[in-house]
Image: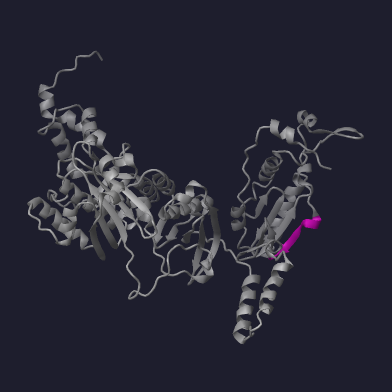
Amino acid sequence: MYIDFSLLNKACPKDCYPLPRIDALVDSAVGFSLMSFLDAFSGYHQIRMHPPDIKDVTFITEDGCFSYNMMPFGLKNAGATYQRMMDRIFREQKGRNLEVYVDDLMIKSQDLKSHIADLEETFATVRKYKMRLNPLKCVFGASRGKFLGHLLTPSRVEPNPDKVSFQSRREVLAFLSNIEGGKKFEWTSECENAFLALKQQLTKAPLLQGPREGEILFLYLGVGAGAVSSVLVREEGKKQFPIYYVSRVLKKAELKYPILEKLAFALVISARKLRPYFQAHSIQIVTDHPLRRILEGVEHSGRLAKWSIELSEFDLSYIPRLAIKAQAVADFLVDYTVEVKEAETSPVVAWEMLVDGASGKNSFGGGMVLVSPEGTRIEQALKVHFALTNNQAEYEAIIAGLRLARELGIQDIKVSTDSMIVAGHIEGEFEVREPTLQLYLTKVKRIIGQFRSFSVQHVPREENTRADLLAKHGPRAGGTMTELFRPSIEEGELMEVDQQRSWMDPFTTYLTTGRLPEGELEKKQVRYKSTYYLLKEGILYRKTLSGLLARCVSEKEVARVLEEIHSGECGSHSGSRTLEGRVLRQGYFWPTLRRDAEEFARKCRQCQEFAPLQLLPA
């Protein structure tokens, strides 16, 4: 008999009691030599209805009106109610020797003696709460069995044979008809071996394993035109064994992501789906693309910044993909890279960089557009805070673009600029007569030496419109922004080498090498806070709420910065709050800025002698 409770379900509020994660239950059930599987008899009917609610489950038949005294099937909150009851009944055993999902129970033990004791404890609980079991669906003392759609064994997880067996006889016969169709086809020993290998692969189900406590797990990522996928594996000796597969079809807007952003999106999807694994284990991302630099090492905004903050709570590291072990990820990843040929015959595939510089009151400074061989575009605007000519702005844009390319790990690059003079300087076709431009050219050639291959060409302005928009309008035209407070050709003032430990050291070490402090609390703090910092050319910067970068100051530089801003040539001996704001607007940051500003303003001798007295009542 079926009762339609759809109207009642619409009127009832949703019970948000969570059901256990099936993958977590399956993982916790692996590794036990003996298992027993219990099934409740008409599970929902073992819970009595609340007396005032009995009238709500009344139904009409030909023989009259009836109502349920026990909880019926079909109610919206029946599953959550039953799970809550089972969690309360078996709260002393859950996770220790028993797992429960609604009306399915599994008792797990390592040996026969402990298994008998676990069964006695379970049956005592069942008798205490007057539960009823279905003996036809109970299995006791098994070394393998089905639980929540998986076949559990002492060492691994296998798919349920009922769900992976062939469904259509026609598909099997189609293969045989193709073999018989060729008139000139000759069945050789090689064909026989290939057929046997193919048959073995088709009939052999993939096996999954559970992770071991404290071990490092590896994540392989793959992207395609319309989907992203990943596989989480564990390593034992020289073999890798899959733990979990994740895949997702991309939606309309996601299809337009650049390939590198699709790769980052695949990592975020995997972290959300496999959150229990990411929280309990250190994860190594195996990739041959600059994923870490995209998420952490380069100034970013929008979804990349959101993803970076979301991933900061996990212990992630990135390693290059040297080889893919067939037993771990065979034919699973959708690899979008082209086949690598011999170095002698394969042409060099370089990134292209479009640059443009602009000077003047209404100009921003410079614009750079990096385009990968696969079509990925990285756009960045350069904000210049000093006066310069058009040629100098062009050089500053090229220098900033080359530095960005080095941060991304690019080895081969081709620069396109609409400045014929600058392109001629770099190519050696034009003579450099101005001393300032000679310094810029020397700086550019020094950076060029860090690339494996480099070329520059002059293009018409019509082919460089995107970089021109970034140079004139900055972030309003799209992309990210970086700032330049002094010319690149100026040598920084020599500072005393500080051998003492600085507050910046943990962040600098993590952004450079990926190493974290030893303490668990410090490790978590550095991993989370590092998303607000950026390391460029060995200098640590803090990302502000306005999107600008503030240079991080060490303890030895604090007094000098405060003195210059408070009582320097342009200082006004302002109060502590104003002093703090001016330091931030000048582009400096350190964690104890507010406290140091208050202390410095209070100890200033001139302020003590000449500042007006505060006569306000207390």
The quadrant of the rendering that contains the C terminus is: top left
Q: Of 253 and 575, which appears nearest the observer?
A: 253
Q: Is residue 421 visible?
A: yes
Which residue is painted at 7% across and 54% down in the image?
433
Q: Of 394 and 317, which appears nearest the observer?
A: 394
Task: Indicate yes or no whether the magenta region holds residue 36.
Answer: no
Q: Which residues are magenta?
A: 135-143
Q: Is residue 565 above or below residue 133?
A: above
Question: Residue 507: horizontal and vertical position, in percent?
Answer: 31, 50
Which residue in the rendered view is the most extreme toward the right?
Answer: 63
Which residue is painted at 74% across and 61% down in the image?
140
The quadrant of the rendering that contains the N terminus is: top right
Residue 240 is left or right of residue 365, and the answer is right
Which residue is painted at 16% across and 41% down in the image?
386
Quadrant of residue 576 within the rendered picture: top left
Which residue is painted at 28% across and 40% down in the image?
473
Which residue in the rendered view is the most extreme toward the top?
Answer: 617
Q: Is residue 490 above or below residue 142?
A: above
Residue 480 is left or right of residue 123, and the answer is left
Question: Residue 55: horizontal and vertical position, in percent?
Answer: 80, 29
